Amino acid sequence: MRDTFVRTLVELAKEDKNIELLTGDLGFGVLQPFWEKCPDQFTNAGIAEQNMTSVAAGMALTGKNVFTYSIGNFPTLRCIEQIRNDCAYHNANVKVVCIGGGFVYGSLGMSHQATEDLAILRALPNVVVLAPADLIEAEECTKALAKYKGTAYLRLGRGGEKRIHDKIENFQIGKAIKVCDGAKIAIFSTGAIFEEVTVAKDVLKAKGINPAVYTFPTVKPIDKETIEQIAKDFDLIVTCEEQNVIGGFGSAVAEVMTEMKQRNAILLRVGLNDEYSVRVGNQKYLRGQYGIDADGIVEKISKLI
């Protein structure tokens, strides 16, 4: 995803000289194409992410369209005061980009595991929150954010994510994307955890269960219309996220369902069960340890039904 993001941003920045990219002293192997082709639109802010965010806010308030870039929790939780006070409060045109959402940097321990970011950024007024599931969604999210006026958060994987879509027609911030039809059960996911959902779907189909599948590249504003329709027509909605279940994507879906006057579906949220990871390992290993891999998704759905 990160290569797709950079490639897309380079093309956009070549056409729009107001686009600026700031990095917190990392990502040079990935960001090199940007500074080579748009050298006057690139700044290395050093290992000072709070300063980077405040500088981005200042640049945005002078008319620039600014993207900040770092890994895991560094551009988000480390900078939450600056995002809130300097960016979101002023509706500044700053897009915070996290590479390595969830357990991508799991081998570096919980300090590098971005597992509360969706909930915390979603709680800030005036902040759009995006988490694409594949390369095509990442490209479309980047294009949409370049046009969006205001503060936003883009949560990306690292690399090697599978491609879901051949193309997306009429991508819009705030709209879910149907991957396949199904009956009785609908699985919603956000972000790169979708690769586990695809495996889980195939296993469930072999068991005679045919779930509909939707990706939600936008966590905020959430697609209320799709959620409400599925909640009326289906028996079970399952949300999958590489994130704490408290306050994240599943909570956003729950909020919509709770306010419905009539609905048929119940909700199952799959994610970290309000805990930090005390284990260390790669992303795939940690997904399995905390029951959010394909096997865990299948087990939770099978047990419930």
Image: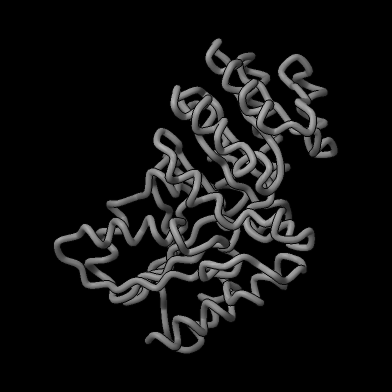
Q: What residue do we see at 70% from left, 33% from top?
A: 49
In the image, residue 34 sits, relative to residue 205, either above or below, namely above
In the image, residue 85 sits, relative to residue 293, either above or below, namely above
Q: What residue do we see at 64% from left, 41% from top?
A: 78
Q: How is the image coloured?
A: one colour
Q: Is residue 154 left or right of residue 23?
A: left
**Residue 183 or residue 59, whichever sits in front:** 59
**Residue 281 or residue 36, whichever sits in front:** 281
Location of the C terminus by quadrant is: bottom left
**Residue 128 lies in quadrant:** top left
In the image, residue 242 sits, relative to residue 209, either above or below, namely above
Residue 303 at x, y percent in the picture? 44, 88
Q: What residue do we see at 60% from left, 53% from top?
A: 134
Residue 208 at x, y percent in the picture? 43, 87
Q: What residue do we see at 68% from left, 42% from top?
A: 74
**Residue 50 or residue 67, whichever sits in front:** 50
**Residue 67 or residue 275, whichever sits in front:** 275
Residue 195 at x, y percent in the picture? 60, 65
Give the residue furthest to the right: 29
Residue 101 at x, y percent in the picture? 63, 53
